[in-house]
Amino acid sequence: MTDQVNRVVIVGGGTAGWLTAGIIAASSSALTRITLIESPDINPIGVGEGTWPTMRSTLETIGVSETDFFRECDASFKQGSKFSRWTSLASTDDYYHPFTAPAKYHDINLAPFWLPFKDKINFAQAVSPQATLCELGYAPKQITTPEYGAVLNYGYHLDAGKFSPFLRKHCVEKLGVQYVRANVSAIHLQENGDIKSVTTDAQGDIAGELFIDCTGLKSLLLGEKYKIPFISHKSSLFNDSALAVQVPYADPTASILPYTLSTAQSAGWIWDIGLQSRRGVGHVYSSAYTSDEQAERALRDYITPAVGKSTAELLSVRKISFNSGHRQVFWYKNCVAIGLSAGFIEPLEATALVLVELSAKLIAEQLPTNRSLMDIVAKRFNTTLSHHWQRIIDFLKLHYVLTRRTDTEYWRDNCQVKSIPESLQEQLALWHVRAPGVCDDIFREEMFSSASYQYIYYGMQGETLISKQPDDKQQAKAQALFMENARYIQQLKNVLPPNRELIEKIKHHGLSAI
Ligand SMILES: Cc1cc2nc3c(=O)[nH]c(=O)nc-3n(C[C@H](O)[C@H](O)[C@H](O)COP(=O)(O)OP(=O)(O)OC[C@H]3O[C@@H](n4cnc5c(N)ncnc54)[C@H](O)[C@@H]3O)c2cc1C
């Protein structure tokens, strides 16, 4: 057949490009040839240090050793996020969004049974051990737990600058991906509008049947060539700027936080990620509500207690601007955008890399064998991705609308009804009279399940007026689960090591391969 899809050309070698190459190469037939073109002149964005537990299965699927990954990518464990001062300005205001769902989540909704005790114990601590163990700095597994196995669910923090070269080496040496170091200078179309080939400065024209745009914010193929419109979501999510800084540990044996710490500021929030050799810290903010100078001041003030005033003033800070939103469609003709070229929304819940994994997996599973089937696959891909983007926007906005902060215009405007997507307004109306639960998971695979909504909703003191008395059997079951959780916490404290201790052991001894 003349319209067979055998040659996949990926343009861009940042994290999106190499993850996509690895995921497709690991699952495609020997007939599929994957070429990745990476510019020697344009650096990858160099941020993106927080991942989801999906990254565990991704790395395992593409055949990476977890030990090598820890050794080469400065990686650490991430068990969720801790949000500080999002609800109020009180120094004690914080809550967790752990990766482990509430106990027996699909059997029983514990939220209504927890509500009468909400002043005594916070939601995340009552329903899962992870928040308490994170607070105490424990790792999510033991050195005897095999690679990719877990006692508590986890993803990673990693050095973005090391991760892409690590993936590149694996993809080229183990998965047979062809690597072309060159700039793409022109894109050639066929009569039907498909991309026929791209011209590179170092290796001439490279032809293919499927082109994947991983060129970052530039969006060279989908945005610049095809002019697919960009849909802005700035009216809901105001942030459009970030300042990033790498912070050394004052003591190289200092503990490493097993979660991403996100501390709300007057016009944004600061992320704090602990790697093995340094912290990655950044201020995400809205340029409409604060200046770059004020944002930088807040960032330097944030790191001063850890490194001292003189170091805090000297560390170099990098500014990144972004538009909050995504392309109208993600797959057009024979071109699909993955990563920043498809869109970007503030990294509050580290949703960018998980979308890369999800998109690449969809392509790997559904890569059409011939061109005539591609439009059907593209249509489904676009429907799925549009749904995920909308759910991400709702979920991120939830963190803002539940605030009780009124100290700045930024927080006050974030609660204005006109900035809240209708779909989120509807959910909030329901949750006022019944707890979020599995009935809110309309699609089979939601990126944020209702369990995540529960953690944020109750973490930020969202209210639910329970009118129905729960039956005695359910009540007894819930009480037993609360007690079991308390006991499990005590047990895990005896067996899980501190986060840094386990990471050091992995570096020296390695984890056992499965
Ligand atoms: C402030 C900030 C914080 C973030 N934090 C997180 C996080 O915690 N978790 C998370 O999941 N995500 C996060 N992200 C998003 C994450 O950084 C990106 O999704 C990820 O790095 C993937 O980027 P990319 O590969 O799409 O683009 P890039 O890294 O920009 O790579 C683009 C590639 O395209 C190549 N290229 C461009 N033009 C050409 C050309 N003409 N010819 C050939 N090659 C070309 C470049 O050389 C480069 O290799 C964050 C983003 C920002 C801005």
Image: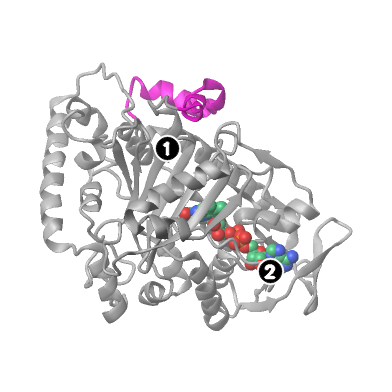
Q: Residue 265's x, y, as percent? A: 43, 38
For badge 1, the amino acid type reads: Asp
Q: Residue 391's x, y, as percent? A: 51, 39
Q: Residue 60's x, y, as percent? A: 42, 69
460 magenta-colored: no
Kind of element beneath mark 1:
loop
Front residue of 446 and 339: 339
Relative to 447, 39 lies left or right: right
Q: Earlier in the sequence, mark 1 or mark 2?
A: 2
Residue at 28% over, 67% down: 251
Q: Quickly name the residue at label 1.
A: 441
- Tell me the quarter of the image containing the C terminus: bottom left
Residue at 58% over, 53% down: 319
Kind of element beneath mark 2:
strand
Residue at 53% over, 79% down: 169
- Where residue 214 sits, quadrant-wise, is bottom right
The circle drawn on residue 508 is none
